[in-house]
Image (cartoon, rainbow, N blue to C red):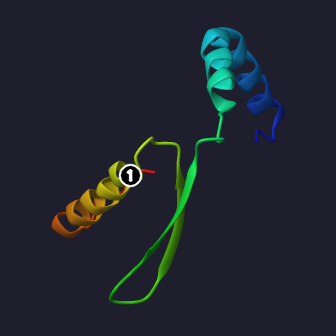
Amino acid sequence: MPKTEKEKEYMKQWRLNNQDKVKQYNKNAVQDYSQGKIYKIVCNITNEVYFGSTKEKYLSRRLSRHKRYVSDNLKNPKRKMPR
């Protein structure tokens, strides 16, 4: 959050200049999770547990993205995984 008066003024001006983007963001921020799924992944090596959630229709799609991110990260460890 902005703390100084200069930062507050900048954010106020930014919002005025980007009202359409802010409205679209706020519209998209209200999401329907009634069809959401919660899942658990356990690492076979370390037994670490990861809980996740998705609104994707098929859970298999989300899990395959997890596998792809892990595979990509093993090939290029410096790459940040998207959320």
- Of residue 75 and residue 55, the one placed in the foreground of this image is 55
Image check: 61 left or right of 49?
A: left
Q: Residue at 25% across / 57% down in the picture?
A: 68
Q: Position of residue 11 (x, y in %)?
A: 72, 25
Q: Is residue 2 above or below residue 47?
A: above
Residue 7 versus residue 55 in the image, above or below: above
Q: To which quarter of the image does residue 20 belong?
A: top right
Q: Quadrant of residue 21?
A: top right
Numbered disc 1: secondary structure: helix
Tag count:
1
Q: Residues within 10 Å of mark 1 (few under 14, many from 20)?
A: some
**At which x and y percent is residue 18?**
63, 13
Q: For the point 65% across and 33% down, which residue is it?
A: 31
Residue at the disc numbered 1: 62
Direction from residue 14 to residue 80 in the image, left or right = left
The residue sitting at 71% across, 24% down in the picture is 10
Relative to the observer, which residue lies in front, 47 or 8?
47
- Which residue is at 66% across, 31% downward? 29
Using the image as rendered, state which of residue 34 and residue 50 is in the foreground.
Answer: 34
Q: Which amino acid type is marked by label 1? A: Arg
Residue 53 pos. (x, y %): 55, 55
Where is residue 14, by image quadrant? top right
Q: Is residue 76 left or right of residue 9?
A: left
Image quadrant holding the N terminus, namely top right
